[in-house]
Image (tube, rainbow, N blue to C red):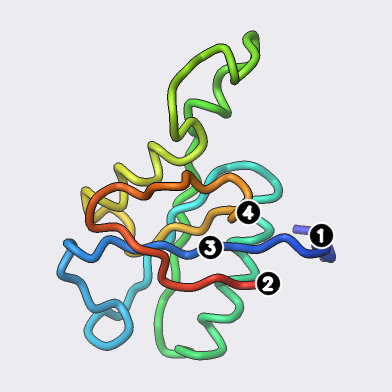
C-alpha cells in the first residue's frame, strides 16, 4: 500500500458494547473490519500501525468487506433510499462478533449508530 498523506480525513473506530469482548486485555487477536476501498484500507492500515505500537504482542487481523454502496454502480446512491449503504455489512459483522472493531471514515458514518454500538475513538 502506498504511503499517502490524508488531509483532514477523520477515521472512526466503533465498537459493539453488547459483544462482551475485552480486546485490549484478554484476547491475543484484535479483529478489525474495514470496507475494501483504497481509502478505507489506507485508514485501517494507519489504525493497525497505531495499535501495533500500543500492543506489540497482539496479532491484528483485517477483514475487508464490500458493502451495498460498493456493489451498486449502475444507480445514483441517493435514488436507492436505503440508509447505511457503506456501513451495514460492517455493522452486521460487528454485531455478530466476527470483528472486534470497525474502521470507517467519519464523513460517511451514519448520524445514528445501531443500538449498542458506540464510537470508540476518532483518529486524525
**N-term mark: 1 or 2:** 1
Residue at left 48%, top 33%? Answer: 67
Question: Most extreme residue toward the top, as rendered?
Answer: 74
C-alpha separation, residue under disc 4 versus residue under disc 1: 11 Å
Q: Are marks 1 and 2 in contact (CB under 8 Å)?
A: no
Kindly report which numbered mark, 3 or 4, lies closer to the viewer in this rendering.
3
Q: Are marks 4 and 1 in contact (CB under 8 Å)?
A: no
Is residue 52 left or right of 17 when viewed as pictured?
A: right
Q: Are marks 3 and 2 in contact (CB under 8 Å)?
A: no
Q: Is residue 58 above or below residue 119?
A: below
Measuring from the top left, give residue 3's x and y in whole percent: 82, 65
Task: Name the secondary structure under disc 2.
Answer: loop
Q: Which residue is mark 4?
A: 41
Q: Which residue is mark 3?
A: 12
Task: Name the secondary structure under disc 3.
Answer: strand
Residue at left 15%, top 69%? Answer: 20
Task: Name the secondary structure under disc 1.
Answer: loop
Measuring from the top left, give residue 29's x and y in whole percent: 34, 74
Is residue 57 left or right of 41 when viewed as pictured?
A: left
**N-term mark: 4 or 2:** 4
Q: Residues within 10 Å of mark 1 (few under 14, many from 20)?
A: few
C-alpha separation, residue under disc 4 versus residue under disc 2: 15 Å
Q: Are marks 3 and 4 in contact (CB under 8 Å)?
A: no
* Quarter in which the N terminus is drawn: bottom right
Q: Are marks 3 and 1 in contact (CB under 8 Å)?
A: no
Residue at left 47%, top 44%? Answer: 110
Nearest to the observer: residue 75 or residue 43:
75
C-alpha separation, residue under disc 1 versus residue under disc 2: 18 Å
Is residue 82 left or right of 118 when viewed as pictured?
A: right
**N-term mark: 3 or 4:** 3
Q: Which residue is mark 1?
A: 2
Q: Which residue is mark 2?
A: 124
Amino acid at each position: 500500500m502506498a504511503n499517502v498523506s490524508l488531509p483532514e480525513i477523520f477515521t472512526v473506530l466503533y465498537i459493539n458494547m453488547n459483544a462482551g469482548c475485552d480486546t485490549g486485555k484478554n484476547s491475543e487477536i484484535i479483529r478489525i473490519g474495514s470496507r475494501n476501498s483504497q481509502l478505507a484500507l489506507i485508514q485501517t492500515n494507519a489504525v493497525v500501525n497505531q495499535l501495533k505500537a500500543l500492543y506489540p504482542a497482539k496479532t491484528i487481523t483485517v477483514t475487508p468487506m464490500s458493502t451495498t454502496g460498493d456493489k451498486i454502480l449502475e444507480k445514483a446512491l441517493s435514488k436507492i433510499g436505503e440508509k447505511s449503504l457503506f456501513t451495514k455489512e460492517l455493522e452486521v459483522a460487528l454485531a455478530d462478533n466476527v470483528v472486534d472493531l470497525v474502521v470507517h471514515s467519519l464523513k460517511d458514518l451514519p448520524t445514528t449508530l445501531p443500538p449498542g454500538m458506540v464510537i470508540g475513538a476518532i483518529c486524525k
